[in-house]
Image (spheres, rainbow, N blue to C red):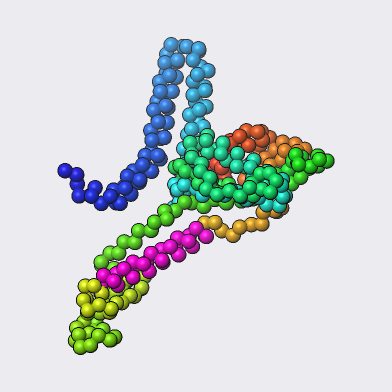
Amino acid sequence: MKPDFWKDKERAQKVIQELNRLKVRILPFSRLKRRMEDCLGLIRLASEEEDESIEKEIKEEVTSLTLEMEKLRLSTLLSGEYDNNNAIFSIHAGAGGTEACDWVDILLRMYLRWAERNGYSFEVIDSTPGEEVGTKSITSIISGSYAYGYLKCEKGVHRLVRISPFDANKRRHTTFAAVDVIPEIEDELKVEIDPEDLRVEAFRSRGAGGQHVNKTSSAIRITHLPTGLVVQCQAERSQHKNKVSALKVLRSRLHDRLRKEQKKQVEELRGKAPDIAWGNQIRSYFFHPYQKILDHRTNLETANTQKVMDGELDNFIHAYLKQSSQVP
C-alpha cells in the first residue's frame, strides 16, 4: 500500500519536481568526478609504462574537463528565485525599418542555435511579420533547466552595423532590436488557507429575515490574520452555509491578491524598457568595416562573428554572470 503522502497528488508532484531540479544540479558534478578519476588513472598508467602515445588524448581530456568544470562553477551562480524557470523570450525590431525586421530574424536564428546547442526546446507563441521582410516582433517560450537564469543575461538592446543588403547604394547602416526575457510562472495559483490563520466570528444577522435572524447567530465573519482581509456572510439561515460562502469569497480575494503580487514581481523583473535606439545597446555586432562583437557591459569582444551568430553565446553569458555576481 502506498503511503498517504502519495494520495496528495499536488504535493507529490511538487516533491518530484524539486527532486528532478536537484538531480539536474548534482548529476553533472557526479559525471565530472568520474571523468576526472578516469583521467587520473590514465595519467598514472601512462607514467608507469612511460607511454607517450596517449599524451595527446590526455591533454585533450584535461582541456575538456577544465572547460566543463568552469561551466559547472558558473552554474552555481544561478541561485535566483526564478533562475530554474523556463524563459518567455521576445525580440522586437527598433529603429531601422526593414533593416531592423531583418535583424530580428538574424537574432532569432542565433538564439535558436544556442538553444539547440544547450538542449533547450524553442516554441514560438506569437509573431508579427515585417511589412516587406523579416519580423517586427516575436515571442517564444524556451524550455529547459535554468533557461531563464542564462537568458536573462541577453535582455537589452542589440545593435547591428553592416552594409545593408536592402540598400542599392551599398551604404553602411546601423539598426537595433530589443530582447526581453522574463521567467515563465505558473498560471494556476493554488490558494491554500490554513485554519489557524483564520479568526471566525458568529454574530446575529442585521438584515431582513424575520425573527430567526434576530435570535440566532447565523452570520459569519472571517478574518484572514496574515493579510488582514475580512469577509462576512449572512445570506443564509445556516451558520455552516454562511461559513462556506464566506470562505469562497476569502479564497477568491486571496487569489486576486496573489495574482497582483505575481504581476508586480514580473514587472520588477522586466524593469523599465529602454528605447530601442542608439545609446542603450548592451552589445554591438559589427559586420562592416571589420568583424567584431563587443559586449558593452563586460567589455568582452570577439572577432569570430560567425561562431557567435551560429549560437556560441556562452562566453558572453558567462562573462555577464561573473560580473553580476562579482566572481573572479
Question: Which residue is pictured at 66% across the width and 57% down the height?
Answer: 275
The N terminus lies in quadrant: top left
Residue 155 falls left or right of residue 248: right
Whether residue 325 is in magenta: the answer is: no
Give the image quarter of residue 293: top right
> Residue 9, position in %: x, y?
28, 50
Whether residue 251 is in magenta: the answer is: yes
Q: Who is closer to the viewer here, 173 or 42?
A: 173
Image height of 164 relative to 260, above or below: above
Tell me if residue 324 can be seen. no
> Residue 19, position in %: x, y?
34, 43
Residue 193 falls left or right of residue 63: left
From this viewpoint, which residue is outermost toward the left? 1
Q: Who is closer to the viewer here, 213 or 145?
A: 213
Question: Which residue is pictured at 73% across the width and 43% down the height?
Answer: 161
Q: Who is closer to the viewer here, 58 or 211?
A: 211
**Stretch in magenta:** 243-267
Question: Which residue is pictured at 41% across the width and 66% down the height?
Answer: 256
Give the image quarter of residue 251: bottom left
Instruction: Name the chief secondary structure element in magenta.
Output: helix
Question: Which residue is pictured at 31% across the width and 61% down the height?
Answer: 192
> Residue 12, position in %: x, y?
29, 48
Give the image quarter of residue 309: top right
From this viewpoint, which residue is outermost toward the right? 169
